[in-house]
Image: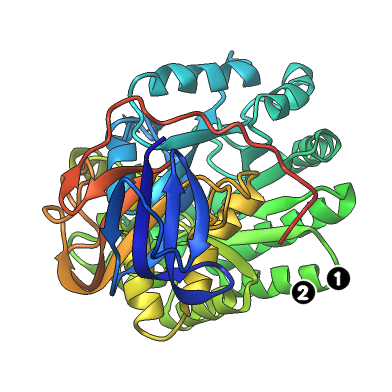
Amino acid sequence: MKTTLIKRGTVVTQKSVATADILVRGEQIQAVGDLRDETVDEVVDAEGMVVLPGAVDSHVHFNDRFMGTVSVHDYFTGTRAAAFGGVTSVIDFSNQGAKESLVSTIETKEREAEGETLIDWGIHPVITRPDTETLEQIPLVVEKGAPTIKCYMTYRDEGLLIEERDLRRISRALAEAGGLLMVHAEDDEMLADRVPQMIEAGRVEPIYHAKSRPIEVENRAVERCIAIAKATGGRVFIVHLASAEGLALIRAAQNEGTNVFCETCTHYLLFTEEMLKREDGIKWICSPPLRDQANQERLWQGIAKGTIAMVTSDDAAYSWEAKLLGKDRFDRCPNGIPGIEPRLNLLYSEGVVKGRLNLPQLAQIIAAAPAKFFGLWPKKGNLSKGADADIVLLNPNEKWTMNTQTLHMATDWSAYEGIEVNGKIDKVFSRGELIIDGETCLAQKGRGKYLHRRLEEFQA
Ligand SMILES: [Zn+2]
């Protein structure tokens, strides 16, 4: 087996920062420490580099059919962009079609991924039809390594909405099967009237997307999620939290011992709703919507305190043509922002360099926490002996401008256009193989492996 020594880097884990060498043997990390006397096949000089665990992005949408379009990130373009962004594991969502069984959604994704992926990938099934057959299949998808199921509290017209009584049944079934319920938390009843009211009043510009989904809409849904976790004893994970008031509710519930958790996403930390007032405001239409500055500061604090467990991308890469469906009416714009590649670089630049996070916190929110929450730990998100050698080398001294050309995403536009970034990913190893070297992607299509996940006893 090939051996590689990654020498004298600043090795960052979720717990520590130290100058060290990493010995990689085959696909795994064999040792971390002072290993300068080892005889190896290859030496990679990492002096001056920040060495991080390969990032885990547990919230991406590949080949996602939504609001009259389909995302342009598939298992090749999406995992390629991810790899450039230091991501070595992704977890995609498999939405249940109208007549589709829950198990077959995983098979659909296996076919999409076959021969395409550059990095390792897993699936969160999405329940859209909470009937008896679907509920009976929950233990089967858990067995297939997909123990984390997502439901939506809104998007009725898209056929995604799940009523509260069904969320409770699903949460109970998951608790019994050893799974976890992920929830898109926006209260549909509160939304239902507001959107048509805005449109009728001629308020069709992007900013009214945010005004039609005020923070109370999210807070009400967060309250309901907490109630579900309490009633069922199941673990509930709120995806893309954007509300600081919702965060306070979650913190209070956690303090009482309720198993409710949350993530936020890169764009809520980088942008405010002011972006929606721009002429190209449709770029920033996502749900829940972007909030104000004060709210954003509290999200950063929530990460530093650990109430927000992780930061994911919620990559939803719709083409510019598709986003333009909303140019005259915000409610026709596919909701979502392409962000699979920028996440690690931006969290380093805006988080660590600006003093909002320290390096171990960065390793925690991009790698260790998603690996632990979603059943990949200790293989993934970890720089210890025996873990998969998923390793990122970031050059802290490089400065660059983020835009469509400097990123490698398949979208023909970027919400992150013109952002000055401190630090740049230089090399990425996936299971011991160098897959990104500067501007070159060395990964062979199809090398990514299915992540058969299993939730252990809960470990925060
Ligand atoms: Zn999403």
Name the quarter where the C terminus is drawn: bottom right
Does the CB distance between marks 2 and 1 fall below 8 Å?
A: yes
Q: Answer yes or no: is residue 184 visible.
A: no
Name the quarter where the N terminus is drawn: top left
Q: Which residue is label 2 attached to?
A: 252
Residue 143 % position (x, y): 72, 25
Q: Amino acid at mark 2?
A: Ala
Instruction: Name, please, the residue furthest toward the left.
Output: 405
Image height of 242 relative to 409, above or below? below
Mark pair 2, 1: CA separation: 7 Å
Q: At x 34% / y 20%, what residue is drawn?
A: 115
Residue 177 % position (x, y): 81, 33
Residue 125 in which image quadrant: top right
Disc 2 is placed on an element classified as helix
Between 87 and 282, the one lying in front of the other is: 87
Q: At x 36% / y 71%, what residue is drawn?
A: 348
Q: At x 21% / y 43%, what residue is drawn?
A: 411
Q: Which residue is label 1 attached to?
A: 256
How many discs mark residues in the rendered view?
2
Image height of 174 relative to 222, above or below? above
Between 131 and 4, the one lying in front of the other is: 4
Residue 344 % position (x, y): 37, 62
Dot 2: within a 10 Å radius of its alpha carbon, few (fewer than 14), some, or many (20 or more) residues? few
